[in-house]
Image: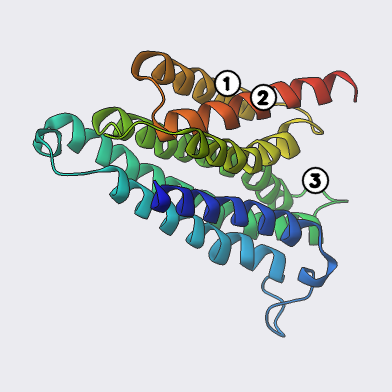
Amino acid sequence: MPRIHSLLAVQSVVAILVSVNRLGTWTLGYVLPNQFLRWVDFNNMLILPLISLVAFYLLKKTIEYDSPAREGRSHLAVNLVFIIGVYLLAASYGDHEVTNYLHVRFCLDDSASDLCRIVIFNDDEFSHWVFFTGFVMMNAALLFLQNLFPHTEKLIGKDIVLLVVNSIFLAAGILANLGFEEIGLDLYVVAFLAILSVYFLWKRGKQPLFVYYSSAYWLGLVGSLIAQTFR
């Protein structure tokens, strides 16, 4: 459990850094003199997702332990889903951050030209579809891995408190994305993962990731719906 808490805390720190990176003015400078990207785009494309994905992979390895399930087809299938999800997430970041920068810099007042039309579609549509597909696959894979490799020790009150505290940072990220903007595909993604996580929690009991994800997604979902009501 200490390692699980630590790796989830890394995700919490990343969530904070994503907000600081997005909202801070210090990241608006250019990475190189040729102005190919701003620091905000570079950090969101390479630095922060890489830290998050390394922590997710180490969390995956922490959950898995020696048991007959390691040799089964279910484990192989879940691993493939996880790997494909990681690839799609990486592809979405590469597509979105570059086209978002070009969109903001060159296409805010020009949505009709062929170049800007393509840039805007990649920024606002295609990269989002790829991201949410990868996001669902990777996070669902972690839930299924927890189901295949249940934690063998009973969670104590301290563990549950730490899991909920870490989940609040993910919930805050969900609220920031769903609560104050027009809701689209992301609502269905969060709702699906919220239902899946609480189903596993009901079926298998208080497993670390079931507690973490159930808390994060339901807090984020309910908070977003309340925020949307009072927009």
Q: Residues within 10 Å of mark 2 (few under 14, many from 20)?
A: many
In the picture of the structure, the residue carrying the numbered disc 2 is 221
**Front residue of this view, candidates 156 and 37:** 156
Q: Residue 30 at x, y = what percent?
A: 74, 76
Q: Residue 69 at x, y = what percent?
A: 14, 33
Which residue occupies 52% across, 49% down?
92
Dot 1: element: helix
Residue 57 vertical position relative to residue 163 in the rendered view, above or below:
below
In the picture of the structure, the residue carrying the numbered disc 1 is 191
Tell me the mark number nearer the camera, choosing from 3 and 2.
Answer: 2
Mark with earlier residue (1, 2): 1
Which residue occupies 88% across, 51% down?
109
Q: Which mark is residue 21?
A: none
Rounded to the nearest whole Å, what is the CA distance between mark 1 and mark 2?
7 Å
- Please say if the residues under marks 3 and 1 sit with CB atoms less than 8 Å apart: no
Residue 190 vertical position relative to residue 88 in the rendered view, above or below:
above
Rounded to the nearest whole Å, what is the CA distance between mark 3 and mark 2?
32 Å
Mark with earlier residue (3, 1): 3
* Kind of residue at badge 1: Ala
Residue 128 vertical position relative to residue 196 in the rendered view, above or below:
below
126 left or right, relative to 222: left
Q: Residues within 10 Å of mark 3 (few under 14, many from 20)?
A: some
- Please say if the residues under marks 1 and 2 sit with CB atoms less than 8 Å apart: yes
User: In which quadrant of the rendered image does the C terminus lie?
Assistant: top right
201 left or right, relative to 227: left
In the picture of the structure, the residue carrying the numbered disc 3 is 111
Quarter of the image where one finds residue 46:
bottom right
Dot 2: element: helix
Q: Is any atom of residue 42 visible in this view?
A: yes
Total marks in image: 3
Which residue occupies 48% across, 19% down?
198
